[in-house]
Image (tube, grey):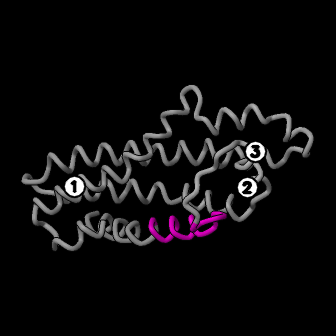
Amino acid sequence: MRKAKRILTGISFFIFPTLFIIGNAFHSDLFSFELHSNVSEWMNEIRMNKLQQIGNVLELSAAPFLLIMIFSLINTINEKGKRFALIGGILALIGCVMLGVSKGTFCLTTAGFDTLPENEFQQIYPAFEILFHKTGLLFITNLLALLPLGFFIMSIGLIMGKKLPPIQPILI
């Protein structure tokens, strides 16, 4: 059983970044750091953008492997860095769940809107307005920022625990 866990963890450390990098590569304007300033601009970018939709599915598919990585890292850390591991792990887990919520909400839902004829698509502008401004409970998708923060804190625990060479936690 222990060997199977190690193999699954190793595979996860390879599959997650691979899926996530490939998924992000499908995004339009990948190297643009400009945020969308209005809903219409965002609607036009995602409308019928099949490559971006495939990318979003790849990123969502990476989430289970990310969970395996998080649990593996939490269990790797010894007593010296355990507090950082638990705090960072909890934050990373919340962030990972928010990755799924965010991809489901903003990507898969909007991909479903592509099935609408153009005149009906234009009529759902208010729905896009809600998504764009993260109205109501959609504000919780901002917790996605806890994912890198959690990994940063876990890396501190890994460095303190001295169970791995110092370069590995830094790379994580």
Foreground: disc 3 or disc 1:
3
User: Label 2, on which residue?
Assistant: 45
Q: Is mark 3 on a helix, strand or loop?
A: helix
User: Tag 2 or tag 3, which sits nearer the N-term?
Assistant: 3
Sequence-wise first label, 1 or 2: 2
In the rendered image, which residue does mark 3 sit on? 40
* Identity, as a three-letter code, of the amino acid under mark 1: Asn
| Residue in the picture at 24% in, 67% down | 170
Q: Which residue is drawn at 57% across and 68% down?
A: 31
Within 10 Å of the Cα at label 3, are there few (<14), some (14-19), or many (20+) other Cα atoms?
some
Mark 2 crowdedness (10 Å alpha carbons): few <14, some 14-19, many ≥20? some
Tell me where residue 136 sits by quadrant: top right
Side of 49 relative to 89 (left or right): right
Q: Circle 1 is placed at which residue position?
A: 75
Q: Is residue 46 above or below residue 38?
A: below
The CA span between labels 3 and 1 is: 46 Å
Q: Nearer the viewer, residue 59 or 145?
A: 145
